[in-house]
Amino acid sequence: MGTVVAFRSGSPEDERLILPFFEPYIAKGEISNLPSYNFYARITAIDTQEPLSGVTKLIDVKSSQKLSNLSKEYSRNTYGIKATEEEPIKVSSKKVKTSPRSDTVSETI
C-alpha cells in the first residue's frame, strides 16, 4: 500500500473498496458521510501510521486562462507520452493489436 486519501463518494462501492485501508479506525458509512472538503488519509512510510482526517481550504484566486494553458503545456511536455499510429496510448480495456508488426495485444484506445 502507499498513501491513501479518501474524500466523500456517493458510491457505496467506492467506500467498500477503500474502507479496508482505514480499518479498524474508520467505520462503515463514515467515508460516504464525510462533509464537503473533508478527507481521511493513511500515510505509509517505513511504519504504517493511524489514519488522520483533514479539511481542504478553499482559497479565493482569480483564474487565468493563460496560466491554465501554460500549466497544461508544461505538464504534457514533462510527463506526457506522444502517441503514434504503431503505439497508441494505452487507456481502455478494449484489446487490440498495437502494431501490424507485432503479435502482442495490449489495452488501447
Image (tube, grey):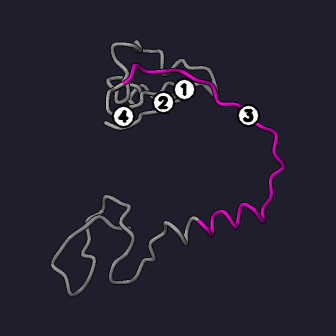
Circles 1, 2 touching at the beta carbon (< 8 Å): yes
Type of the residue with mark 2: Ala
Circles 1, 4 touching at the beta carbon (< 8 Å): no
Q: CA distance from mark 2 to mark 4?
A: 18 Å
> Is 1 placed above or below 28 here?
below
Element type at mark 2: strand
Q: CA distance from mark 3 to mark 4?
A: 28 Å
| Residue 67 screen position, x and y as percent | 75, 62
Q: Which residues are magenta?
A: 49-74
Q: CA distance from mark 1 to mark 4?
A: 19 Å
Residue at the bottom extreme of this rendering: 101
Q: Residue at x 42, y 77 (%)?
A: 83
Quadrant of the drawing holding the N terminus: top left
Q: CA distance from mark 2 to mark 3?
A: 18 Å
| Residue 45 screen position, x and y as percent | 36, 34
Q: Residue at x 56, y 20 (%)?
A: 34
10 Å crowding of disc 1: few (<14), some (14-19), many (20+): some
| Residue 5 screen position, x and y as percent | 47, 32
Q: Which mark is residue 58?
A: 3
| Residue 94 screen position, x and y as percent | 30, 62
Type of the residue with mark 3: Leu
Q: Residue at x 44, y 72 (%)?
A: 81
Q: Which residue is mark 2?
A: 6
Type of the residue with mark 4: Ala
10 Å crowding of disc 3: few (<14), some (14-19), many (20+): few
Q: Which mark is residue 45?
A: 4
Type of the residue with mark 1: Phe
Q: Which mark is residue 39?
A: 1
